[in-house]
Image (cartoon, grey):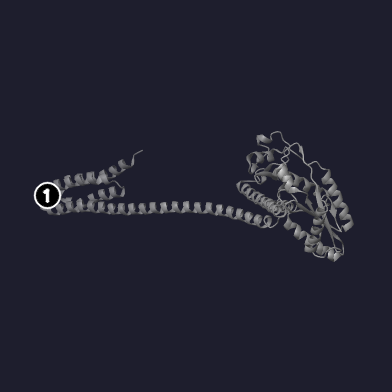
Amino acid sequence: MFDYRFVTLLGATLVFAPLSVLFIFISGMGPGLFPLYGLIFLWCDYRREAEAHVIFLFMVTTAGVVLAASAAAQRNVLGAEILGMWILVWALGLHHRRGADVLHEAREEMAKLAGSLRDDESELTRLNAYQASAAVQIGLRQDLTESARSLGSTLDGREVHVRLNGILCARFAGSRVRIQAWASGDPLLELAMKAGTVALVKDTATDARFSSGGAGFRSGMAAPLKVMRQSAGFVKVESDQAGAFGTQEVQSLDLITTMASLSLENIRLYETVQEQATHDPLTGLFSHRAFQARLHEELLRAGRSQTPVSFILCDVDHFKTYNDRYGHQAGDSLLRSVASMLASFARPVDFPARYGGEEFCLVLPSVPLAEALDLAERLRARVEAESFVFQGVKTGATMSLGVSAFPQDATTASQIVRVADERLYRAKAGGRNRVAGV
C-alpha cells in the first residue's frame, strides 16, 4: 500500500511533530526532550534512508534555534545538543561509508573469487577434455603399436590378412569383420572405394543410401586396402546395433588398415627387390648369382641322398654376328625367346638361369646324364626350328650345349661347371649347333 520511503518519512515525522508541539507549549522541557530528536536519525538510519537525514537535520537544527531564541538561559545546552545531533548524523554517515567500503571490498573479493571459480571451472573443463582426448590418443597408439608389432613381423601376404582379421575382431569385439578383394556391389564398400578412406554408416534404417533395405546390418565401417596406390581389397566391420561406431572407431580402423596396407606394400617391395636380386632383368630367368647358390645346394642334397644331378650349359651360336647383322634390339629379343624356350623345357624343380651374355644354363636335380643329353638335344632342335621373327624379318639362330653330371663327371659345383664348359667348347669347335656330353 505504502512504499518504503513513505513509511520511513512517516515514522520520522511522527517523532518530529509531537516533540515540536511540546516545545511550543512547554518550552521549559526543550533541553530535556531535544535529544529525543535523535530517534529520527536512528529510525532513518535503520531504514537506510540517507536523504531523510539531511532533511530532518535541517528541521531539527531550525527547531533548536527557535527553541534557543525563546529560552535564553538554555541556549548553551541547546547549542551543545544541536552540535550533538550533527555529530550523530556525521557518525552515522561515517559508519555507513565504512560499511559501504567494507561491502565494496567484500563484493570485489567475491567477484575475484567468482572469476577464479570460473577460471577453475574452465580449466577443469579443459582438463577433462584433454583427459578424454588423451584417452583416445592412448587407445589409438595402442592400436597402432599392436598393429605394427603384429603386421610388421611377417613377409607373407596371406598371413597379414589372417593377423589383420584377428586384430580387428579383438578391437571391435561383438562386430562382424570381413576382408574381401572386391566391392562386389556392396554399397558400403563402394562408398569407401569412392572416398578412398574409411566410410561410416551409423544407421542404415535412417540413411537414404540404404533405403532399399537388405543391408544386413544397422551400422558399419569400411576401409580400402591399398598397395602401391592400387586397390588390394577392402575391410568391413558390421554391427546389428545403430550407432555402434563413432569417431574413435573410425580412427582406429583407419590406423589399422593403414598399417596393413604398409605391411603389404613392404612385402611387395621386398618381393620386388628379391626378384631383381635373383632374376635377370632382360630374360626373367634366375641370375648367375642365384644359379651358383642353387647349384651348390642341389649338389649337397644329392650327395646326402645319393641321387644324380645334371647340368646343361648352352650358348647362342655366332651371337655377335647376329647383333651386328640385325641390331642389339633383335639380339635382346632373341635372348628373351631362347630363355622362354629353356624355361618351357624345365620342370618345376629345375633351375633355368642366365649364365652370362648369350650363355644359359639349366640345373636338373635327380636327372641322370643320359636323360639330360636327350633334353639338351630336344632343346637344340627346338631352337634350330624357330624362325625368331623380328620386325617382320625371319632371322634364325642355333645353340651349342655342353652337359655334365654329378657324380660321374664332378663332385663340386666348380667342377661340374668346368666340365660342362669344356664340353660346350668342344661342341663349338666341332661345328656348333650340337650337344656334347661325354
Residue 431 spot, x, y in % from top left: 82, 51
Please determine whether, in this image, residue 152 is positioned above or below residue 198: below
Please determine whether, in this image, residue 66 is positioned above or below residue 288: above
User: Please, what secondary structure does the residue beneath circle 1 have?
Assistant: loop
Q: Residues within 10 Å of mark 1 (few under 14, many from 20)?
A: some
For disc 1, the marked residue is 71
Tell me if I can see residue 240 in this picture.
no
- Identify the amino acid type marked 1: Ala
Exactly how many numbered labels are in the figure? Answer: 1
Residue 407 spot, x, y in % from top left: 85, 64
Quadrant containing the N terminus is top left
* Nearer to us in this view, 31 or 214: 214
Quadrant containing the C terminus is bottom right
Q: Residue furthest left?
A: 72
* Nearer to us in this view, 162 or 418: 418
Q: Residue at x 25, y 49 (%)?
A: 41
Tell me if I can see residue 77 in this picture.
yes
* Nearer to us in this view, 117 or 158: 158
* Nearer to us in this view, 320 or 304: 320
Residue 52 spot, x, y in % from top left: 25, 44
Q: Residue at x 88, y 52 (%)?
A: 374
Residue 337 spot, x, y in % from top left: 77, 45
Asked if residue 417 lies left or right of residue 126, the reply is right
Q: Residue at x 17, y 53 (%)?
A: 83
Q: Residue furthest right?
A: 370
